[in-house]
Structures are given as structure tokens and as C-alpha cells.
């Protein structure tokens, strides 16, 4: 599976959950269904990870397609204005209670049945805030 994180954006403040998101891309050749996938958050170098939740009902990412997964709830005004859906980039809301991207070294993993599908590290020094992969 060639699902990859192309952008990680931290929340502008603890209350503005709709300003925090990740953008996922299907760089593979077949559609990918996210139903049942989960997202974990941890720290670089630590085995401890927290499951943020399961994506349900989920969505299907077609080859070459991207989706923005926002932390908050679009109907909750105090969580900020959700980003505009432009250039075919749609929003999917996770309805989480708090922001999860804290600082450099935060590691996000998309998992399916306990297995890693894609992993990325938050690095605010990078243009997309995704640290380069370490080989």
C-alpha cells in the first residue's frame, strides 16, 4: 500500500481544532479504503503510542487522490473555521476532543488491524512539516 502523509499542520491554538490536520495521499495504483483504520500518535524514539480513534465510516482514496483529515468538528464554531475544499482536496473530520500534534518529534501512524500503513514525523522546519524519511 502506498499511502503517505504529505502534510501535517499543528493547531493554531488548543481550542482551534479545525486548524489542525494531516493530508494523506494514495500514491499507489489501487483504491484504498480507510474504514477500520486507526491513527496513533507517539514520540520519536518511544515505543509508547496512543490510539486517537478508528476511522468509521471512512472513505476511499483513489490512486493519486488526497484527503485532508481535520482534527475537529465542522459544526462546532469555537473550534475554528474548517479549511476550504479547493483543488479537489476534500475534508474528513475526526471529531477528536483535543489537538494531538504538539511539537517536533510527534510521530503519526495510520494503522489497519494493528499493522502500520503509513508513518510520518512532524517537523515544523520542513515546508510541509513532514520530516524526511530516514532510511
Image (tube, rainbow, N blue to C red):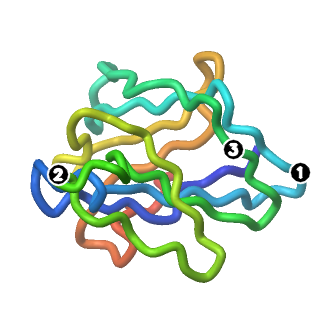
Tag 1 or tag 2, which sits nearer the N-term? 1
- Asked whether the beta carbons under mark 1 and mark 3 sit within 8 Å of each other, the answer is no
Give the residue at x 25% y 40%: 100
3 vs 2, front mark: 3
Residue pointed to by mark 1? 30
The spot of residue 121 in percent (x, y) is: 37, 50
In this picture, is 96 found above or below 5?
A: above
Circle 2: element type? loop
2 vs 1, front mark: 1
Residue pointed to by mark 3? 59
The label shown at residue 70 is none
Q: Relative to residue 18, is residue 30 drawn left or right? A: right
Tag 3 or tag 1, which sits nearer the N-term? 1
The spot of residue 33 in percent (x, y) is: 75, 39
Q: Relative to residue 13, is residue 47 drawn left or right? A: right
In this picture, is 65 found above or below 4?
A: below
Q: CA distance from mark 2 to mark 1?
A: 33 Å
Quadrant of the frame with the N terminus: top right
For this orientation, the residue located farthest to the right is 30
Amino acid at each position: 500500500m502506498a499511502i503517505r502523509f504529505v502534510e501535517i499542520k499543528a493547531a493554531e491554538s488548543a481550542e482551534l481544532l479545525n486548524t489542525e490536520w494531516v493530508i494523506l495521499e494514495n500514491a499507489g495504483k489501487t483504491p484504498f479504503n480507510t474504514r477500520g483504520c486507526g491513527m496513533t500518535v507517539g514520540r520519536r524514539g518511544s515505543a509508547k503510542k496512543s490510539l486517537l480513534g478508528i476511522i468509521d465510516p471512512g472513505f476511499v482514496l483513489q490512486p493519486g487522490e488526497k484527503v485532508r483529515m481535520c482534527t475537529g468538528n465542522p459544526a462546532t464554531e469555537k473550534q475554528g473555521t474548517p479549511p476550504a475544499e479547493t483543488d479537489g482536496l476534500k475534508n474528513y473530520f475526526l471529531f477528536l476532543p483535543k489537538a494531538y500534534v504538539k511539537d517536533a518529534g510527534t510521530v503519526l501512524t495510520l494503522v489497519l488491524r494493528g499493522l502500520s500503513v503509513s508513518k510520518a514525523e512532524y517537523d515544523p522546519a520542513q515546508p510541509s512539516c513532514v520530516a524526511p524519511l530516514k532510511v
